[in-house]
Image: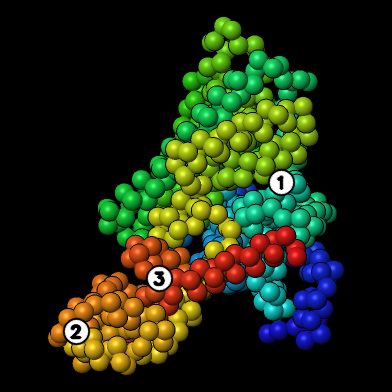
């Protein structure tokens, strides 16, 4: 299915039409957020028999049988579904970051709908996962689908995918600036004046759509100081560092639990049930361990708890989140990291009160700072989390404190760990992705596309005298040598052959690079690394290490030129030239 050619042409040549497409994507993403919220809310109300006006994680009490049984049975059903999908759709699902980094924004709408449905189900049965993964996946998936129908250019399609994710997050949090920077920092991967208007328009319309439908998130009601004293900023930075370290522990914990499940040889379909059982046990102790914690964040961020009690809440929520994702529930840590960060901030405030020379501050300040710092540590995007805190509290007096903690937490994670939660999971799968910056073109710029045909080959037993007659100086700089079976033997240089004297000398005596060669599937960066390792200016391209059939020849000079041309093209795309 494709739209008419005239519309495709208009979108490709006039950015005003691309703005309209981004606006449409923003509205659809807002509808998707509202629908997912409604389904999750109805599941909570009916499955957990909540009192009117109460949401799951904020409810003061819960039927223990439902608190334990619903996550466990819901995990069993999800496990069976995952087992069936693994058999009939074994290909991994591509998320927006991976799509923009490797595939030029191309995603499957069907896969995105599956992820959204799994996320709603996981959250609806009480698993301690956020809905943001489903929101962003659905918004980006719809954007990618529309972009493919309009046959958008690679860079425009990547931007539209960022618009879809930005609109979804903006609508979910009622925070258009947060959503816009989510799309820029995490989905597109680079700030650009060219892409900013599209993303902002989509985020605004996504927020307005959710507001009109009546699903917008209320502001956080929290006591914050009118000004932050100068001597408190050092304490705030220490809290940011602590948030970074706690975020690393949580991300490592998820990985350890996943590894333990995998090594235990427990069937895949049974793992979510076991994870749900543990989450249910924690839910019996406190409903705050269930679901994303979004409603609990709003209800309790300004409530003072005894130190040991709030520390227990933090530990229960952290364990529930790690086991939910580690066991196979679908969702993210965005919402959960906000609640965890607020609890961590309250724990930090309790410790700060014991230090005599620290100026007493409301615990709400440390909670808001911890919320942003923890989310920045786990999810990444310090500007995204800063704007989220400011738009959620509608208080700009703490801007410097929140921004400082978010940046310090991000630096701590990068220095000690090197990954956000999303990129860490890519690393575990073997994908070398550190952000959504477009590196897919590197994978498409392969040796097979750059190589040139071999003009001349000789046998290793050819005498140097004959070689000098057949290949006079200046004809070529290098000659590929193959044996009688057509197998690669090495490379000979005519200049060296001209300088070697002696009777009976053969090409065998001046062979080079016998063990260094390229394969057509290598990308340009791998090829350049091999050129450097071999200290060669040209290498033969072979079909494999066993048959050693020569397919072509590639020079380092040409590979560098093509690499620099592509880099320059990407620079011009980003700058809008």
- Name the front one of labels 1 and 3: 3
Identify the residue shown where x is 41% and y is 50%. 326
Q: Along the horizontal axis of the image, is 340 left or right of 518?
A: right
The residue lying furthest to the top in this view is 356
Q: Quadrant of the N terminus?
A: bottom right
119 shown above or below 353 = below
What label does residue 537 carry, if any?
A: 3
SS state under label 2: loop
Of 49 and 437, nearer the camera is: 437
Reading the image, the residue beneath label 1 is: 178
Disc 1: CA contacts within 10 A as few (<14), some (14-19) or many (>=20): many
What label does residue 81 carry, if any?
A: none
Circles 2, 1 touching at the beta carbon (< 8 Å): no
Q: Along the horizontal axis of the image, is 294 left or right of 456?
A: right
490 shown above or below 364 = below
Q: Along the horizontal axis of the image, is 527 left or right of 136?
A: left
Identify the residue shown where x is 61% and y is 52%. 186
Q: Earlier in the sequence, mark 2 or mark 1?
A: 1
Circles 3, 2 touching at the beta carbon (< 8 Å): no
- Name the front one of labels 2 and 1: 2
What separation in Å lies between label 3 and label 2 (alpha carbons)?
Answer: 23 Å
Give how far across and how far down residue 171 sits, in percent: 73, 52
Q: Is residue 354 visible?
A: yes
Please tell me in which quadrant of the rendered image residue 4 appears.
bottom right
Of 538 and 296, nearer the camera is: 538
- Name the front one of labels 3 and 2: 2
Please tell me in which quadrant of the rendered image residue 503 appears.
bottom left
Identify the residue shown where x is 42% and y is 77%. 554
Disc 3: CA contacts within 10 A as few (<14), some (14-19) or many (>=20): some
Give how far across and how far down residue 260 sits, in percent: 31, 49
What separation in Å lies between label 2 and label 1 (alpha carbons)?
Answer: 70 Å
């Amino acid at each position: 299915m494709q739209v008419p050619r005239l519309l495709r042409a208009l979108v490709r040549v006039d950015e005003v039409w691309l703005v309209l497409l981004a606006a449409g994507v923003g509205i659809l993403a807002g509808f998707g957020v509202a629908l997912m919220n409604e389904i999750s809310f109805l599941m909570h109300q009916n499955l957990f028999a909540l009192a009117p006006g109460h949401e799951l994680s904020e409810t003061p009490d819960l039927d223990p049988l439902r608190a334990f049984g619903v996550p466990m049975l819901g995990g069993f059903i999800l496990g069976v579904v995952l087992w069936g999908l693994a058999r009939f759709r074994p290909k991994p699902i591509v998320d927006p970051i991976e799509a923009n980094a490797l595939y030029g924004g191309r995603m499957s709408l069907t896969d995105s709908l599956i992820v959204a449905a799994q996320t709603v189900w996981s959250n609806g049965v009480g698993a301690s996962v956020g809905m943001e993964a489903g929101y962003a996946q659905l918004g980006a998936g719809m954007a990618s689908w529309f972009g493919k129908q309009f046959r958008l250019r690679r860079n425009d399609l990547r931007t539209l995918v960022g618009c879809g994710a930005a609109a979804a997050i903006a609508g979910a949090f009622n925070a258009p600036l947060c959503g816009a920077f989510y799309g820029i920092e995490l989905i597109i991967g680079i700030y650009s004046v060219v892409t900013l208007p599209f993303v902002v328009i989509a985020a605004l319309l996504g927020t307005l759509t959710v507001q009109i439908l009546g699903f917008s998130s209320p502001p956080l009601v929290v006591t914050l100081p009118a000004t932050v004293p100068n001597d408190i900023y050092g304490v705030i930075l220490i809290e940011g560092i602590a948030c970074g370290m706690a975020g690393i522990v949580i991300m490592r914990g998820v990985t350890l639990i996943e590894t333990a499940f995998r090594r235990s040889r427990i069937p895949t379909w049974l793992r979510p049930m076991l994870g749900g059982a543990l989450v249910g046990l924690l839910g019996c102790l406190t409903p705050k361990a269930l679901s994303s914690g979004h409603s609990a964040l709003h209800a309790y961020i300004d409530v003072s708890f005894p130190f040991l009690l709030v520390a227990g809440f933090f530990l229960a929520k952290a364990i529930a989140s790690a086991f939910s994702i580690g066991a196979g529930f679908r969702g993210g840590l965005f919402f959960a990291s906000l609640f965890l960060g607020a609890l961590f901030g309250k724990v930090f405030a309790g410790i700060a009160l014991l230090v005599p020379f620290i100026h007493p501050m409301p615990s709400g300040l440390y909670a808001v700072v911890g919320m942003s710092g923890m989310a920045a540590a786990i999810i990444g995007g310090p500007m995204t989390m800063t704007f989220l805190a400011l738009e959620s509290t509608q208080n700009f007096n703490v801007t410097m404190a929140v921004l400082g903690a978010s940046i310090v937490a991000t630096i701590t994670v990068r220095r000690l760990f090197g990954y956000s939660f999303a990129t860490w999971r890519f690393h575990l799968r073997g994908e070398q992705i550190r952000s959504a910056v477009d590196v897919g073109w590197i994978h498409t710029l392969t040796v097979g596309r750059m190589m040139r045909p071999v003009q001349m080959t000789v046998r290793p037993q050819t005498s140097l005298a004959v070689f000098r007659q057949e290949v006079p100086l200046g004809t070529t700089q290098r000659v590929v040598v193959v044996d009688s079976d057509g197998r690669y033997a090495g490379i000979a240089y005519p200049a060296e052959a001209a300088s070697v004297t002696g009777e009976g000398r053969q090409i065998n005596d001046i062979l080079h690079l016998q063990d260094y060669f390229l394969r057509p599937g290598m990308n340009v960066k791998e090829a350049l690394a091999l050129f450097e390792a071999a200290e060669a200016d040209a290498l033969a391209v072979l079909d494999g290490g066993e048959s050693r059939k020569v397919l072509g020849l590639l020079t380092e000079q040409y590979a560098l030129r093509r690499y620099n041309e592509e880099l320059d093209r990407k620079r011009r795309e980003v700058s809008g030239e």
